[in-house]
Image (cartoon, rainbow, N blue to C red):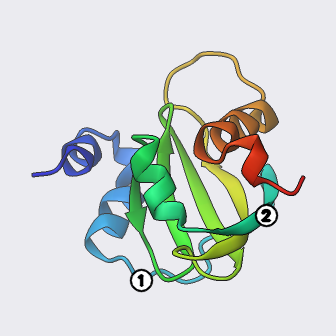
Amino acid sequence: MTTLERWCDRLPVGHGILRYLYKHPVVTGMTSEDGPVQRCTLNEPVDLRVALDEAAIEYLDVDDDKTIVIYRSAVLIVRATEGHATNATAFAVELWEPPADDFEYEPDDLLATFIDELIPREKRSQ
């Protein structure tokens, strides 16, 4: 059993969708972009899943473009907007579920910190 599987098994009942997504990775209409979203444009193609591995951030592949990420107990959706997750030149990050603990945070700051950990500034166009 992977760490992510163990984490999913410990989620409160309200997070049952994550358990479902782990076992059924094809999901449609996952991002609404109604919540906080940040976009990032890259200087050259980046494999987002390799970057997540290198940053030791846990994730689940959804399809060629979307990835569910567990970051500081928040659930994020990372979607390649140019290219695919394995060769993205641009991507968007949406806060899908806020952090499970009760620490105060600004959603935009959380997303910006995630992007900073994932992609060094020198590899970004903006």
Given the current orientation, which residue lies at the most extreme top position?
A: 103
Amino acid type assigned to the residue bearing label 1 in the image: Val
Q: Which residue is drawn at 46% across and 41% down?
A: 55
Amino acid type assigned to the residue bearing label 2 in the image: Asn
Closer to the N terminus: mark 2 or mark 1?
A: 1
Horizontal side of residue 103 vs 26, given as left or right = right
Work out whether 122 lies above or below 105: below
Q: Which residue is drawn at 65% across and 73% down?
A: 88
- Whole-angstrom CA distance, mark 2 to mark 1, is 30 Å
Horizontal side of residue 9 vs 67, given as left or right = left
Rendering coords of residue 16 (x, y %): 36, 55
Q: In which quarter of the image is residue 78?
A: bottom right
Work out whether 102 lies above or below 52: above
**Is residue 111 or residue 126 the one in the foreground?**
126
Given the current orientation, which residue lies at the most extreme right position?
A: 126
Badge 2 local density, few (<14 within 10 Å), some, or many (20+)? few
CB atoms of marks 2 and 1 within 8 Å? no
| Total labels drawn | 2
Work out whether 119 lies above or below 23: above
Point out which mark residue 43 bears.
2
Rendering coords of residue 74 (x, y %): 54, 39
> Nearer the viewer's eye, disc 2 or disc 1?
2
Q: Name the residue under label 1.
A: 26
Point out which mark residue 75 bears.
none
